[in-house]
Image: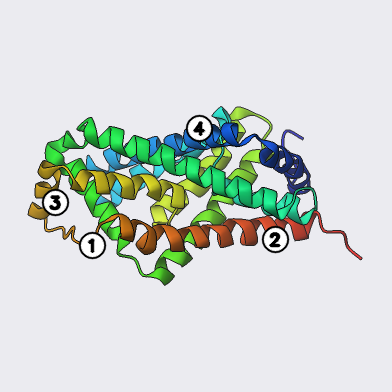
Amino acid sequence: MNFFSPAEVAENYVAIGKDKVKLPAGKMIMLAVLAGVFIALAGVGSTTVAVSVEAASLGKFLGACVFPAGLIMVTLAGSELFTGNCLLTIPLLQREIKFGGMLRNWLLVYIGNMIGGLLVAAAVVYSHEPDLFDNAEAVSMLSTAVTKTSLSFGDAFIRGILCNFLVCIAVWIALSAKDTAGKILGLFFPIMLFVLCGFEHSVANMYFIGAGLFAKMVPAYADAAAAAGLDLSGLNWGTFWTGNLIPVTLGNIVGGALCVGCVCWAVYLRKQK
C-alpha cells in the first residue's frame, strides 16, 4: 500500500510522540516559534486574499483555501504546533510517555507558538502591510480581532472543539500518506473546512488577535476602523485571553486530545480483554 492504515498511524504516532517529549526545552521552543510563524504567515495570506474580493462569501472561501499553507509548512518543514500536539494523549495512554512530559511539551510549545504569532503580527502591522486596499486590510484585521474577542465563553469553547477535531484529523490523514503530495492533500481539506466554517484555532488567534491589537495602536488604522463603524473599546490584552484564548485553548484540547487522540487510541491500540 502507498499509505499507512489507521492502526499503523496510531502505532507510528506513539514513536513520534516519544520523540516530541524528549526534545530539549530550547529546541522545542525554537521549533514552536517556527510553527507560530508558519501559521501566522498563512493568516496574513488568508486575510489579504479575502479582503481583495468584493463578494464576502467568495472572499471567505478563498481565504480558507490559502490558510492550509500554514499547517503544510508546519508538517513538512518540521516544527512544533500546540494544537497538533494534543495527539500526545495517544502515547500517554499507551504508557510510553508521562503526563508531566506531555504537559511540559504543551506549555513550552504554546509559549513558542505565541512568540512566533506575535512576532509576525508586529512585523506585519509595523511594516504597514495593512495599508493595502486603502487600509481595508487593516479594517479587516481589526474586525476579525473584535469579532473573536466578543464571542461568549461557550461559543468560543465549542468552536475550539470543532476546530481542533478537524486539525488533528488533518494531521492524522497526513501521517497516513507516504509521499509529499499525499500529505499536502490530506492536510488541505480539513483545514479549509475549519476556516470556512469559522471555527477557532488558538495558535491562529495568537496572530489574528495580536495583529488587531497592534493595528489598534496605529492611528490611521484605528481611524479607518472607526469610519467603518467598528467599536474597538473592548479589544485589549485582557479580552485577548479571557474573551478568546482561554476558552478556545480548552476547546482545542478537548477536540484534539480527547475527541481524536483518546478515541483513536481506544479504537486502534487499546488491548481488548
Q: Can residue 148 be seen in this view?
A: no
Q: Nearer the viewer, mark 3 or mark 1?
A: 1
Q: Which of marks 4 and 1 is in front?
A: 1
Residue located beneath label 3 in the image: 225
Residue located beneath label 1 in the image: 234
The quarter holding residue 233 reads bottom left
Circles 2 and 4 in contact, beta carbons < 8 Å: no
Which residue is at 66% across, 35% downward? 23
Numbered badge on residue 263: 2
Residue at mark 3 to residue at mark 1: CA–CA distance:
13 Å
Numbered badge on residue 73: 4
Circles 4 and 1 in contact, beta carbons < 8 Å: no
**Sooner in the amino-acid sequence: mark 4 or mark 1:** 4
Q: Which amino acid does label 1 sit on?
A: Gly
Circles 3 and 4 in contact, beta carbons < 8 Å: no
The quarter holding residue 18 reads top right
Q: Which of marks 3 and 2 is in front?
A: 3
Which residue is at 22% across, 48% downward? 140
